Image: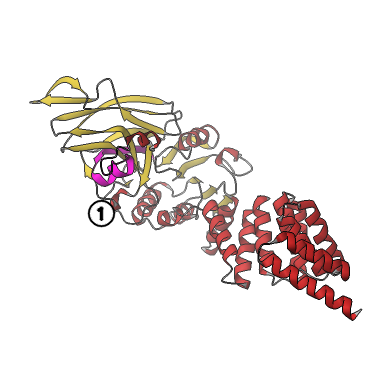
């Protein structure tokens, strides 16, 4: 018996070595031989792991399940089962196995991380993030848990939330408008985020504030923030505004809508559809909207750094221009941090009165006077919010822009165009309620002017 046990131990040691070297065939062979010599949970588990790595998933699963039945007190085996079941897409059984592992050993960082990954797949982001944090409490240098936590938080609450919260100019503009409009009124805040706008409204003297947030994790955090600040007039709904109902989520129609659900491109977070629905179902007939007007503003942009972002540059006599077919038609940058040439005065691309009730798609053509000679490569765009006729906020690119959650966009022309201060550039612009597109009007293109009089249209090659 002693000789048999020693043989099993030697075979198991060989299996461990082979597994560590990535030789899963040898690892399985040695582990199975060890299990035959002396049936142990550890040998069956290692054989199962090796078979799973070889792609023999069901066989590997069966071997690890055997290990768990031989030694039901070892948390390693249900943890391995949970990992395998996760890979196989059986998330409910994976959760059960990992719950078992953590019941056996609450300080098992790997099981906590694995459970977080399973819960993400099951759509429970809030609990998943809590388990990633638990894994890092147990092992602060656990790389997998750290990576998973960063990825989960970035997906749930993208990084732009933080500079948005830190944007003092934006915050003050909203706070000032709410001080004038909110007192005594029922407020609906769409897109709770951190809860900041809702708390501004409550502090300004609103009779009642309802705020909604479609991301459950952010809604939960917003509730905590609001509770910590003792704002008892605020009700937080973890729902899209289109799912809110009068009498259930709001006691009655709101008299004021406040929102900052604008994308860097103004429209792509669905602001127009959101406002239309709110007017139809959630607001009084004479409701005030903050901001009352939102616009996309731009200027012609050029400069070598911007051109390098938008067009393939030749190198040492090699023409790379066909690669321009893959260039982005729209590029997001913080232009206050990138040197560039401003080739025109500011002009409005599209503006929307959010007190209106319908926002149809639109197309327009404009001629933009050039104010500086250079190579025009696109149109820089930012947003401008007229909050209440007094407070105005815009994130125009300037060196003093500071923290800003909204980026600037560049709408790329299909080719760089040499311009002088005597020119006008003809642009065509459209929006489909969700996005804006800007391009060169190929019919008119670049219009040369002499003594202020337009001449025949001319396109530069």
- On the question of residue 78 being in view, the answer is no
Return the x and y of residue 207 as percentages of the image width and height: 50, 50
Q: Nearer the viewer, residue 384 or 387?
A: 384
Magenta span includes 309: yes
Return the x and y of residue 108 as percentages of the image width and height: 69, 70
Highlighted range, magenta: 292-317
Most extreme residue toward the left is 451
- On the question of residue 325 being in view, the answer is yes
Q: Is residue 43 above or below residue 388?
A: below
Q: Nearer the viewer, residue 74 or 406?
A: 74
Q: Nearer the viewer, residue 121 or 321?
A: 321
- Residue drawn 29% across the image and 38% down it: 298
- Residue drawn 43% across the image and 42% down it: 262
Whether residue 446 sits left or right of residue 249 in the image: it is left
| Residue tagged 1 | 399
- Residue drawn 78% across the image and 54% down it: 93
Magenta span includes 162: no
Classify residue 455 by image quadrant.
top left
- Residue drawn 31% across the image and 33% down it: 413
Return the x and y of residue 319 as percentages of the image width and height: 30, 37
* Quadrant in which the N terminus is drawn: bottom right
């Amino acid at each position: 018996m002693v000789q048999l046990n020693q043989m099993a131990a030697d075979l198991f040691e060989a299996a461990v070595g082979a597994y560590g070297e990535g030789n899963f065939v040898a690892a399985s062979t040695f582990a199975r031989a060890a299990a035959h010599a002396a049936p142990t949970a550890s040998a069956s588990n290692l054989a199962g792991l090796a078979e799973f790595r070889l792609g023999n998933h069901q066989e590997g699963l069966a071997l690890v399940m055997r290990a768990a039945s031989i030694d039901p007190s070892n948390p390693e085996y249900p943890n391995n089962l949970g990992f395998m079941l996760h890979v196989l897409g059986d998330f409910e059984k994976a959760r059960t196995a990992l719950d078992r592992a953590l019941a056996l050993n609450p300080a098992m960082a790997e099981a906590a991380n694995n459970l977080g990954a399973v819960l993400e797949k099951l759509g429970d982001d809030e609990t998943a993030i809590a388990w990633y944090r638990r894994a890092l409490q147990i092992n602060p240098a656990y790389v997998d848990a750290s990576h998973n936590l960063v990825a989960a938080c970035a997906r749930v609450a993208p990084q732009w939330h933080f500079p948005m919260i830190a944007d003092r100019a934006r915050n003050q503009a909203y706070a000032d408008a709410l001080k004038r409009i909110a007192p005594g009124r029922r407020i609906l805040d769409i897109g709770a985020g951190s809860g900041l706008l809702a708390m501004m409204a409550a502090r300004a003297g609103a009779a009642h504030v309802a705020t909604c947030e479609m991301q459950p994790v952010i809604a939960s955090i917003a509730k905590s923030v609001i509770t910590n600040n003792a704002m008892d007039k605020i009700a937080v709904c973890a729902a899209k505004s289109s799912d809110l109902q009068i009498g259930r989520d709001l006691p009655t129609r709101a008299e004021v809508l406040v929102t900052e659900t604008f994308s860097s491109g103004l429209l792509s977070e669905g602001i127009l559809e959101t406002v239309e629905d709110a007017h139809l179902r959630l607001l009084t007939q004479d409701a005030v909207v903050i901001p009352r007007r939102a616009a996309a503003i731009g200027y012609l942009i050029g400069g070598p750094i911007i051109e390098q972002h938008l067009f393939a540059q030749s190198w040492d006599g090699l023409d790379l221009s066909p690669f321009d077919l893959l260039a982005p038609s729209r590029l997001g940058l913080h232009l206050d941090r990138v040197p560039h040439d401003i080739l025109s005065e500011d002009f409005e691309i599209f503006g929307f009165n959010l007190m209106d009730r319908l926002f149809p798609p639109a197309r327009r053509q404009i001629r933009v006077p050039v104010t500086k000679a250079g190579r025009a490569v696109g149109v820089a765009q930012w947003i401008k919010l007229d909050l209440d006729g007094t407070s105005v906020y815009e994130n125009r690119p300037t060196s003093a822009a500071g923290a800003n959650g909204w980026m600037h966009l560049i709408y790329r022309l299909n080719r760089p165009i040499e311009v002088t201060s005597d020119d006008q550039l003809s642009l065509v612009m459209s929006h489909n309620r969700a996005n804006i597109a800007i391009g060169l009007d190929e019919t008119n293109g670049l219009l040369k002017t002499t003594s202020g009089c337009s001449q025949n249209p001319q396109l530069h090659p």
